[in-house]
Amino acid sequence: MTKAILAKKIGMTQVYDEQGRVTPVTVLEAGPCHVVQIKNDKIDGYNSVQIGFLAKKEQRSNRPLKGHFQKASLKPMRYLREFRVDDSSGYKPGQEIKADCFSAGDYVDVSSIARGKGFAGSIKKMGFSCGPKTHGSHYHRGPGSLGAVAPARVFKGRRLPGRMGGWRRTVQSLRVVETDAAKNLLLVRGSVPGPRGGLVEIKESVKGR
């Protein structure tokens, strides 16, 4: 059974082990989450579990969404995500999932939306080289030539200036350093994409260590 949970990014800090070595960690408020819907191979064609996270006011949900949560005897929640699992028979609607589903030493894959950075040029966005900066060139950070004289068009796939950031990013095989079920906290080694307070999806690593 694949383990998965939703979390909120709190920030970064550092912890020390018994030998006095420092480890940078990201603090995640993991759960408590609740199972809203279960899909199985016989009816839906695949196995998955739908998880809800963070309660919200009922008047901010429409009637179809309220009915969807009422089937699992739950109140509407802010976030709703679906995770593929090997076997969904181990889950039940309304079941609570807390941070203790993972333990120290586990390896997880973390997904979230990276911080948006607005419009950016090709040098900042893709790492293009700068133009000549001497002999009065007056053309330092432009995109340069976009192709040959003929055919007179820009080919598909050409990397150009545009919106940077805001992409979905996944960091694989991050080690869980510490768990605190009482405070619903997970301490994961290394950095996690996204801003503070952003939604983070955590699931059992597909690659392991």
Image (tube, grey):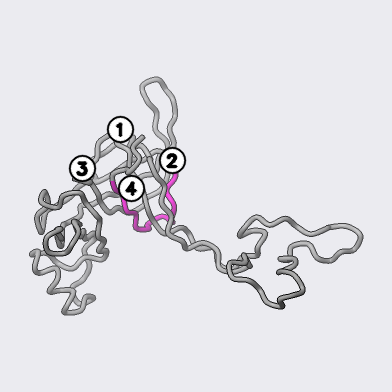
Residue that mark 3 sits on: 101
Instruction: Judge whether 96 appears above or below 103 on screen.
Output: below
In the drawing, what numbered circle is on residue 28? 4
Main SS, magenta region, reads loop
Magenta residues? 191-203
Q: Residue furthest top?
A: 19
Mark 3 belongs to which amino acid?
Cys
Residue 164 marker: none
Which badge, 4 or 1, is on the more N-terminal residue? 4
* Of the image marks 2 and 1, the number of the one nearer the N terminus: 1
For the residue labelled by badge 4, is the local secondary structure a helix, a strand or a loop?
strand
Q: Amino acid at mark 2?
A: Gly
Using the image as rendered, state which of residue 196 and residue 37 is in the foreground.
37
- What separation in Å lies between label 2 and label 1 (alpha carbons)? 14 Å
User: Where, quadrant-wise, is the C terminus in this rendering?
Assistant: top left
Q: Nearer the viewer, residue 153 or 78?
A: 153
Residue 206: image quadrant is top left
Residue 113 percent location from the top left of the image: 42, 59
Mark 3 and mark 4: span between their CA atoms?
14 Å
- The residue at which mark 2 appears reads as 190
Amino acid type at mark 1? Gly
Q: Where residue 4 sits in the image (x, y, percent)?
A: 25, 49
**Residue at 39% across / 56% down in the picture?**
112
